[in-house]
Amino acid sequence: MASKAGADGAPAGARLVLLTLAAGQFLMALDSSVMNVAIATVAEDVGTTVTGIQGAITAYTLVMAMFMIPGGKVGVLIGRRRAFMIGCVIYGCGSLTTALAPNLPVLLIGWSFLEGIGAALILPSIVALVAGNFPTEGRAAAYGIVAAAGAVAIGLGPLIGGIATTYFSWRWVFAGEVLVVLVILVFARRIADAGDEEHPRIDLVGAVLSAAGLGIFVYGVLRSDEWGWVQPKTDAPAWLGVSMTVWLMLAGLLLVYLFLRWEARLVERGRDPLVDPAMLRNKQLTGGLTMFFFQYLVQMGVFFVVPLYLSVALGLSALQTGARILPLSLTLLAAAVLIPRFLPDVSPRRVVRIGVAALLAGAVALMAALDTDAGAEIVTVPLLLIGFGMGALASQLGSVTVSAVSDRQSAEVGGIQNAVTNLGSSMGTALAGSLMIAALTSSFLGAVERNEAIPDEVKNQAVVELQSGVPFLSDAQLTTALDEAGTSEEVAAAALEANEAARLDGLKAALAILAGASVMALFFTQRIPRTQPRSPAP
């Protein structure tokens, strides 16, 4: 049995348990970012298109979103440690399959399906196992370290992917994941199980409704960039003149509503629900979940915008881009670890508010710093602020949500919590991407219309092309396209100037929506408790 000690000053056994769980969180988060810098290379290697690889990434997100809540219930049925280890085995098989994948179908099986199922078992189990292996007063530090491990993985992902792709092969990333899984399995035996003596039956109808509802909603959000949010883009699917994004999101919400009604019906009949609807009336729990949603919305939006600015606007390589993001990881880890250690009795509400304020300040500072003549160093201070904000939130939110319910419900909370963070991540990336492209399009068209050097036929062609969706182009990519089109030097210079200004307008618009989300999050901090949870007296 693992020693139940705090994360700080804990015996070696407890520290090893924490490192094992943090390694699992790191591994789950790494896949979300490590391959973004190597999409074109992966596509060429497995004989498909960039769209095919983007589809695989989308499918991975969908599988996790669909099975996260049922995955949390599996931990209740078979024990949290067993669910964690089975999830690691499935995830490891998926990583091995991906590393050896000769084509896209095999890649989809390994990366999208097996790794997605593994993650849906692992992530809720981690939440429950931290609750089962650490006393209440030590959980803030433990959850902070685990959450920081995941966020650091997202920050390091582009750097790791860039190194592997540049000097070795993207396949080595997944082969390395298999080795990490094997190490985790060796040390997972030291983790105290957090299973129940009761073994309720799983609610299959609820599992289908929750999976379908969350999956359809997330799919709609993920396709918003291509289809449009409300007004459908050219050749995009629509119904009654409205983009299918809206209809899929509405259908997903309807299914989630039916899921909650079904769960309430099961409770009335005295049967075991997948999720007890009474938990969602818990003010502290819903407050923590809401803050998780906003944290991941802003976090993934930042990890979407900043690499684009560094790699496309400034033309940095994948390695240079990853190195420039490191300051965020440093302050994130420092805040997540040091706040619980040196301020164990600090008000969670105060820390969360300070964290949200730091996210807001970082986003605004980054908006102010972006400029056509700025160097890569201008992102350092904003990223330090954003990293501190993320770390401050990570140091409190996990403990806030789990302490709101009994330890017996920790796995269910883990499933809901990870489903919410998945929604936040999807919304953050989609909102930032959509607003960035809309602002970029409007800015570029305005500059083109005002420039008398550009012929009318070129302006008309630009309007048609932009209405069907505009890519975020670097100067080198645009120059190549203009040369291939035989554009005159004067027109090319005007287009490059317009593109440069439009890129910055798009990036600032994306950061504005993230700053707005941070302000909105402040209104929900009232639900975060003022005092740290404590273990009950023996």
Image (cartoon, helix red, strand yellow):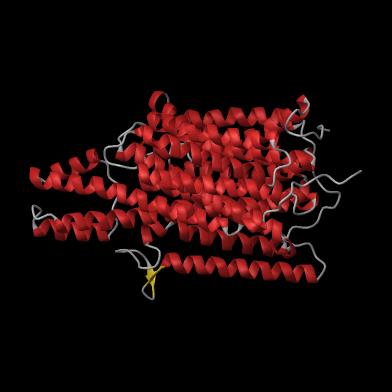
372 lies left or right of 48: left
- Which of these two is toward me, 270 or 409? 409
Name the residue furthest bottom: 240
Residue 323 percent across, percent down from the top left: 43, 29
Q: Position of residue 449 (x, y in %)?
A: 16, 59
Residue 26 in sight in this render: no
Examine the rendered structure and indicate whether residue 192 appears above or below residue 447: above
Residue for point 77% across, 50% down: 76
Residue 159 or residue 57, whichever sits in front: 159
Q: Is residue 69 left or right of residue 152?
A: right
Residue 14, image quadrant: top right
Res. 161 image quadrant: top left
- Residue at 38% from the left image edge and 69% from the top image edge: 238
Q: Quadrant of the C terminus?
A: top right
Compared to residue 483, the image places residue 464 above or below, namely below
Q: Is residue 54 visible?
A: yes
Would you place residue 159 above or below residue 433 in this image?
A: above
398 lies left or right of 464: right
Q: Quadrant of the N terminus?
A: top right
What percent of the width, then of the height, locates residue 266?
A: 76, 68
Location of residue 176 in the rendering, given as x and y in whole percent from the top left corner: 54, 28
